[in-house]
Amino acid sequence: MNILFVSTGNVCRSPIAEGLLIKKYEENNIEGVVDSAGFESFTINEPPDSRAVEAAKKFGVELTGYSRLFVKADFDKFDKIYVMDTKNYHDVKDLARNKSDMGKIDYLLNVLYPGKNKTLPDPLSQGMYDCDHITHELDKAIDKIIKSIQSS
C-alpha cells in the first residue's frame, strides 16, 4: 500500500510518520511507497527539524529526507493520504479532483480514534517534550496501519 503523510511544513510530524512506516514496512516485509509532503513553500528542500530527528532516533528511525510540497499528482501515486490536522485536511481536500481522491484522505489519528477527526498538534512551537509525545502517538498509529495491512 502506498501511503503519504501530510503536515504543514513537512519538517516534523509527517517526516516522523514517514520514517516510522518505512521502518515497519521493512521489518514486516511489506511493499509500498511511503512519503511525506506539506503546504508551506518556505520549507521546500529543508531537512527535518532537529527535534524531529532527535525524537525519531529514539525509535530507531533516521530522518534523511527533505521537505516537499503536496501536489495533485500525489492522488495518483498514493492509496491513502493521512493528514495531521484540520488545516492539512482542508488543504488536501481543496486539491482533490473527484470522489476517488476524496476517499483517499483521512486524519491519521482516525486510525486510533475512528471517526473522531482528532488532530495531532504541531510540536515545533512547543518544544522537545511535545515532539517526543507526538512521536509516541505516531508510532501507535503506524502500528495500527501495519496491522490493518497485514490483515487485509
Image (tube, rainbow, N blue to C red):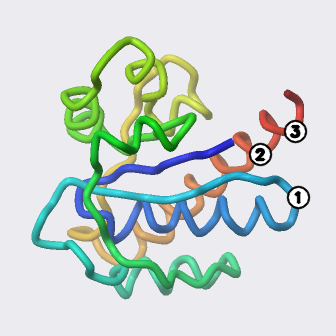
* Number of other residues with Cα within 10 Å of mark 2, as a class: few under 14, some 14 to 19, many 20 or more: some
Quarter that holds the C terminus: top right
In this rendering, would 13 be left or right of 123? right
- Give the label on residue 150, or none: 3
Residue 98 vs 33, above or below: the answer is: above
The reply to whether the C-beta atoms of the residues labelled 1 and 3 are less than 8 Å apart is yes
Q: CA distance from mark 3 to mark 2?
A: 6 Å
Residue name at image x 64 percent, y 79 percent: 61
Amino acid type, label 1:
Asn
| Position in image of residue 64 (x %, y %) | 49, 84
Q: Which residue is mark 2?
A: 146
* Number of other residues with Cα within 10 Å of mark 3, as a class: few under 14, some 14 to 19, many 20 or more: few
In this rendering, would 30 be left or right of 9? right
Quadrant of the image occupied by residue 94: top left
Amino acid type, label 3:
Gln
Q: Which residue is mark 1?
A: 28
Residue name at image x 19 percent, y 73 percent: 43
| Position in image of residue 54 (x %, y %) | 49, 86
Task: Determine whether the residue tagged by mark 2 lies in a helix, strand or loop.
Answer: helix
The reply to whether the C-beta atoms of the residues labelled 2 and 1 are less than 8 Å apart is yes
The reply to whether the C-beta atoms of the residues labelled 3 and 2 are less than 8 Å apart is yes
**N-terminal of the two: label 2 or label 1?**
1
Residue farthest along the top direction in this orientation: 99
In this rendering, would 65 be left or right of 123? right
| Position in image of residue 104 (x %, y %) | 48, 27
Residue name at image x 79 percent, y 37 percent: 149
**N-terminal of the two: label 1 or label 3?**
1
